[in-house]
Image (tube, helix red, strand yellow):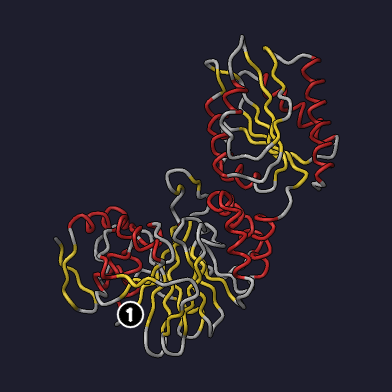
């Protein structure tokens, strides 16, 4: 155990947490003056409303799966009413020291609103509760059980709120809006009525580490938000449609998410979400492929050429080197997916199987799918991949498989596939 100090009071922290702080952030003392003096302090976003949280410049992978080329932030917010103070969300556990240093000069927190039980927002709750033991954790009923499971928070620390319930902080009012499945079942958002700010947690978020509090480069944030939507929100498009409809009634002047920058002019990101969730697929083929000796690549090149000649846009991803986040992002708009895959060990190349598994899990709105590839002597590549896409509501177009290197007949079959794709896109009005 280590002794540490916040606001002059001696406290004790567990050895394991002290070691983690030491390993992740260097010299210990997350409540101490040394650490506190080097940490970005709270930043004002409105009257008595502050961003606090951590910028994770170095993180490059989330969930041991999702690439973070630009790092991320874990945004928490402090709302100080005339009578009560609320902390909205916390930060990822390895950055708890940053949050605690920012809270070192805060005397009282009455409520900790936990919008989402995932640890990048809830993980520092035990540390905040240790410092503010009287604070109540405000959650949806479903989040309560999840936080008990994940963080072992005692049951008596919680206050559950129903959809639409309000909490007065004096001159500021928090309204809780249940928004399930953005992107876990327990998620909710908070609307600060007097200031017309929506605290949306993951909803509308983006993974960008930046010192800019508000959106400064809309193009960059559009791309990061779309990537974020594709990776974690897209599987829940149907229920997100309901949540977007629900928020139509709310006068939102600012959206403060828990990752990335704050939207001080939020209409464009709300329009973008509407398009990603409900818009028609585009006249676009996404073509993830892998090639071992060049034959599948020749098929891919021919199909790309045929499609482009016929006015269809194509996005190509070599699965041996691609960033899967970019592939996910392309799937948001694609009308057709074509997987380019050689046969290996009697089945699909594992990289193509991985991409197909991900596409099935992400449930994009694509309507058509085909498979092209080369094999040596046989196998069950098409059957195996076709059995991996039960979630996709797609029509499977005639695959083109060739033995060895492609022949003239194989190229003609690819031209026919391109013709079929053009016809299907036209029939559906995809532009
Ligand atoms: Fe940013 Fe679902 O956590």
User: Eyeballing the image, is 154 above or below 353?
Assistant: below
What residue does disc 1 label? 110
Nearer to us in this view, 42 or 229? 229
Q: Pinpoint residue 123: horizontal percent, then vertical percent.
A: 34, 60
- Quarter of the view holding residue 19: bottom left
Q: Is mark 1 within 8 Å of ligand 1?
A: no
Q: Pinpoint residue 96: horizontal percent, then vertical percent.
A: 33, 63
Q: Pinpoint residue 398: horizontal percent, then vertical percent.
A: 73, 25
Q: Is residue 145 left or right of residue 304?
A: left
- The crowd level at tag 1 (other Cα within 10 Å; few <14, some 14-19, many 20+) is some
Number of marks in the rendered image: 1
Nearer to us in this view, 396 or 128? 396
User: Eyeballing the image, is 431 above or below 206?
Assistant: above
Q: Residue at x 58, y 64 (%)?
A: 243
Q: Quadrant of the N terminus?
A: bottom left
Q: Secondary structure at mark 1?
A: loop
Nearer to us in this view, 53 or 120? 120
Q: Residue at x 73, y 29 (%)?
A: 397
For this orientation, the residue located farthest to the top is 377
Q: Residue at x 83, y 31 (%)?
A: 419
User: Eyeballing the image, is 409 above or below 371?
Assistant: above
User: Eyeballing the image, is 242 above or below 102?
Assistant: above
Q: Pinpoint residue 136: horizontal percent, then vertical percent.
A: 31, 74
């Amino acid at each position: 155990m280590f002794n540490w100090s916040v606001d002059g009071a001696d406290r004790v922290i567990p050895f394991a947490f002290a070691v983690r702080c030491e390993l992740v952030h260097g010299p210990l003392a997350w409540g101490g003056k040394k650490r506190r003096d080097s940490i970005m302090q709270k930043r004002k976003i409105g009257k008595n409303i502050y961003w606090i949280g951590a910028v994770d410049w170095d993180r490059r992978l989330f969930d041991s799966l999702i690439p973070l080329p630009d790092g991320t932030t874990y945004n928490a917010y402090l709302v100080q009413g005339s009578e009560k103070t609320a902390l909205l969300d916390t930060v990822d556990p390895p950055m708890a020291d940053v949050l605690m240093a920012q809270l070192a000069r805060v005397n009282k927190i009455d409520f900790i609103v936990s919008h989402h039980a995932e640890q990048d927002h809830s993980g520092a709750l035990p540390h905040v509760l240790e410092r503010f033991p009287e604070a109540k954790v405000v959650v949806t009923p479903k989040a309560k059980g999840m936080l008990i499971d994940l963080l072992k928070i005692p049951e008596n620390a919680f206050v559950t709120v129903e959809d639409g319930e309000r909490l007065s902080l004096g001159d500021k009012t928090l309204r809780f809006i249940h928004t399930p499945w953005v992107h876990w079942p327990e998620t909710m958002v908070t609307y600060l009525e007097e200031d017309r700010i929506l605290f949306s947690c993951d909803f509308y978020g983006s993974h960008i580490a930046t010192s800019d509090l508000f959106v400064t480069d809309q193009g960059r944030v559009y791309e990061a938000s779309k990537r974020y939507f594709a990776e974690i929100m897209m599987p829940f498009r149907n229920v997100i449609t309901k949540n977007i409809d629900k928020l139509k009634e709310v006068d939102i002047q600012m959206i403060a998410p828990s990752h990335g920058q704050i939207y001080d002019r939020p209409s464009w990101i709300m329009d973008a979400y509407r398009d990603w969730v409900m818009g028609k697929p585009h006249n676009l083929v996404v073509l993830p492929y892998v090639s071992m000796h060049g034959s599948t690549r020749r098929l891919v090149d021919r199909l790309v050429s045929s499609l482009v000649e016929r006015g269809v846009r194509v996005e190509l991803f070599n699965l041996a080197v691609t960033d899967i986040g970019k592939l996910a992002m392309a799937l948001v708009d694609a009308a057709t997916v074509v997987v380019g895959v050689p046969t290996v060990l009697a089945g699909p190349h594992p990289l193509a199987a991985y991409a197909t598994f991900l596409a099935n899990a992400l449930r994009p709105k694509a309507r058509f799918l085909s498979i092209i590839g080369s094999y040596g002597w046989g196998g069950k590549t098409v059957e195996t991949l076709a059995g991996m896409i039960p979630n996709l509501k797609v029509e499977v177009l005639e695959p083109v498989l060739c033995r060895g290197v492609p022949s003239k007949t194989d190229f003609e079959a690819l031209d026919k596939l391109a013709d079929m794709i053009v016809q299907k896109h036209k029939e559906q009005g995809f532009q």
